Amino acid sequence: MKLIVQIPCHNEAQALAATLAAIPRRIEGIDEIDVVVVDDGSTDETVAVARREGVRYIVRFARRRGLARAFMAGLDESLRRGADIIVNTDGDNQYEGADIAKLVAPILAGEADIVVGDRSPATLAHFSPLKKALQKLGSWTMRRLSGTGVADAPSGFRAYSREAALQLNVVTDFTYTLETLIQAGKRKMAVVDVPIRSRATPRSSRLARTMGHYVAQAGAAMARAYALYEPLKIFSVGGSLMVLAGVLIGIRYLYLGAGTGNVQSLILAAILSIVGFLLLAIAILADLLATNRRLLEEITYRVRKNELDRAETRRAAAPAPRARVSPGSPAEKPPAADVRG
């Protein structure tokens, strides 16, 4: 059983060493632990720190592409390196590395496909009252949209089984945390959360400029992700309401009489009815596109799985490598294998 901890980074040279040092070297039920660092176009010494700390696998972007793209690149690289379980953590040392054992335990027990670390935001002293309220509202909304019971939806400290990782496809450029939860819920994956520890970070968030910007971006990401999987619900509800409003206004016009000067009511009723029927037509088309998307996702899953299975077969047939030194050992560290994005 191989565990890979992936760490998306953008200018995390100051905190990356501490983050790597906190990753446990042994976990019961895990035979091998490795690390993948994804450098999202850093302009500081992030890559140099990763190499100095003995990280074997580094994915590098020439320019910044965003957290969602870095997450998916790390996921793909981890799968290529033979991961059975993938843990995602942040490079700013926000999460306690020792809690990785808590994250992987439900997957090892066969009780979950995805495990989300619950920071208990309401108890965090470094969260303002407004941020706590927004976190609570956002997590409640995500539970309603995704059908999962996750208490801390924005948490980036997560564990994924191999099968779950193969099925995830992030299309947004903002963040993966919300979209992957909706995908998991719609795919009927087993998603659980476990309590974890977190600490304040000395720098501000690099995901959003302000809290208002984050709320706007997160809301758009949730709406888009939900619309991808439930377009019929979204467009049919809006279309039905508009048609109903048009019909009611039309009935009012007929009841009052055509000669009373209420022509504007007739025009409004016609506009609402036309727009409503157009939305209903869009709902049907969008539902057909969603069906095609599900088929494409299934094809993508099978292609990725077949590619990884063939790669594992080739590795198994290859001559046994020399005994390697695990990252973090005081002995000579192996050179990093850079993958350019």
Image: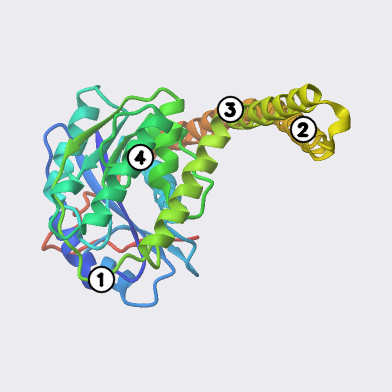
Depth check, mark 3 against mark 2: the one in front is 2
User: Mark 4 or mark 1: which is in front?
Assistant: 1
Instruction: Identify residue type, mark 3.
Output: Arg
Q: Distance between the residues labelled 4 and 2?
A: 61 Å
Q: How crowded is mark 4: few (under 14 residues within 10 Å), some or many (20 or more)?
A: some
Sequence-wise first label, 3 or 2: 2
Residue pointed to by mark 3: 294
Q: Regarding mark 3 in the picture, which secondary structure is present there?
A: helix
Residue 204 picture quarter: bottom left
The three-letter code of the residue at mark 1 reads Arg
Q: How far apart are marks 4 and 1 (CA)?
A: 34 Å
Q: Quadrant of residue 67?
A: bottom left
Looking at the picture, does residue 338 appear above or below residue 231? below
Mark 4 vs mark 3: in front: 3
Front residue of 339 and 197: 197
Q: Can you identify the residue that label 4 sits on?
A: 82
Q: Is residue 66 above or below residue 81?
A: below
Left or right of 37, for residue 243: right
